[in-house]
Image (spheres, rainbow, N blue to C red):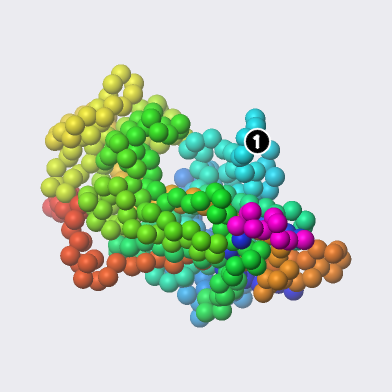
Amino acid sequence: MKANLLVCAATALTTLSGATAFAGTITEWNTDNVTVPAGPYVDDVTYYSTIYNQDVTGGTAGANTNGRIAFTPPESTGPGITVINDEPFPGSGNAIPDCIIATGGECQGPFQSGKRFKLQITDSGAIDLVFNVSEDDEVNSYRVYEKIINATGGRLDGFDIELGFGLGDGFVQSTAGDGLGFDLSEGSKANFPFGLFGDASTNQNHDLDGFFDTTARAGFLTNLSEDSLSSDGLFGIYEEMFGPWIALSMIPEGYFWDHDGDPETDAILMAWLNADGEWEMRREEDGSEPSPIAPTIVTEQDLIDAGYLLGEIEDLANLNVDYYVSIGDISSWLTYEQGQASPFGTASFTLRLIANEVAEPAALGLLGLGLGGLLLARRRKSA
């Protein structure tokens, strides 16, 4: 019998470990409600696994989609999400050896190794990621490495993530003590990438302060309960500069420096097209390394002559979200099926994302904020 599709949550680890006889292990991403592009895949081409609100193993007729998983070989490959259990890790400490991650990644992989799976929001409405679970005798906590990308074409006011069971209109939210929940002991974060906002001295993976803010992070505050994670307003200077969370289609352009000649590492943003339509440098070369400077207006030819490369500042639409899901006793789940050949059963749960749109009047009033330069650039290119 096909595993039921679900939206999911997991109970706090401390609660689960003291109250269950059995627990569960996440075995795989259930793609019954997903269309995955067939391989073979070509390097440096982006593919999309499209997520629907119903089982589409028999076709997509009548199904709706609000999101997709993007993956680009060789960094990641299809279907775009994988589950890792009991990954060995070096040294000692409290590293979590289980994770939900981009295909090809490792829970303990190094910085910039492409661990985060990329969930693109393409429209308002629920996006349901379903995971299959096998019953065992050990509570498991999974770190979720996720990048949420606004690809709606409009601004977003935030997001909600819920744990539960089922798809679409049949979704049932998880309840307290049912063996499924967010791990409250680990907390949650929702930040825009560090390369744009942050003090390098506070992060062991960075030695260069943020491009737009060299002193503090920017992102969404979060409210976390056993079965829901919700955003609670922006913090940092993001909203002051750009308004509510902008979409990929609205991001400004920038000039980037490939300072190390290594295609496996990110090029460094040196200048951007600001809201006044001017090219503004915020970093300069200091030998072979970049260094922050006070905002300085330059010409585009200056940037071209320096050997910098034109691109879009995609991370302004990208939100890095970190949280943990714990799997306890699955025997009461709506999707539970008793095992036939063994004493252990199986089940599935759903991780549901819902995007919060900006109210129309606010969206219209803020449309040009921080984006005047982008519009000027497009007019200039088409002239």
Vertical order, 62 against 212 (above or below): below
Q: Residue at x 30, y 47 (%)?
A: 236
Q: What residue sits 20% from the left and 61% below the top?
A: 366
Q: Residue 368: x, y in percent?
A: 18, 58
Residue at 81% x, 63% y: name it: 344
Which quarter of the picture shows residue 200? top left
At 66% from the left and 63% from the top, the residue drawn is 179
In the rendered image, residue 262 lying in the magenta stretch gets the answer: no
Q: Horizontally, is 146 left or right of 347 in the view?
A: left
Q: Nearer the viewer, residue 138 or 132?
A: 138
Residue situated furthest right in the rendering: 341
Q: Which residue ends up furthest to the top in the rendered image?
A: 287
The image shows residue 133 at horizontal and vertical percentages of 69, 61
Q: Is residue 129 visible?
A: no
Image coordinates of residue 24 in percent, x first then y, are 71, 59
Three-letter residue code for mark 1: Phe
270 on left or right of 344: left
**Quadrant of the rendered structure where residue 197 is?**
top left
Give the residue pinned by disc 1.
89
Are there few (<14), some (14-19), or many (20+) residues within 10 Å of tag 1?
Answer: some
Q: Residue 13: say if magenta.
A: yes
Look at the image and give the residue range highlighted in magenta: 12-21
Q: Nearer the viewer, residue 354 or 20?
A: 20
Instruction: Determine whether the residue tagged by mark 1 lies in a helix, strand or loop.
Output: loop
Is residue 363 in sight in this rendering? yes
Q: For this rendering, which residue is in front, 346 or 154?
A: 346
Residue 30, horizontal then vertical, whole percent: 63, 63
Quadrant position of the N terminus in the picture: bottom right
Total numbered labels: 1
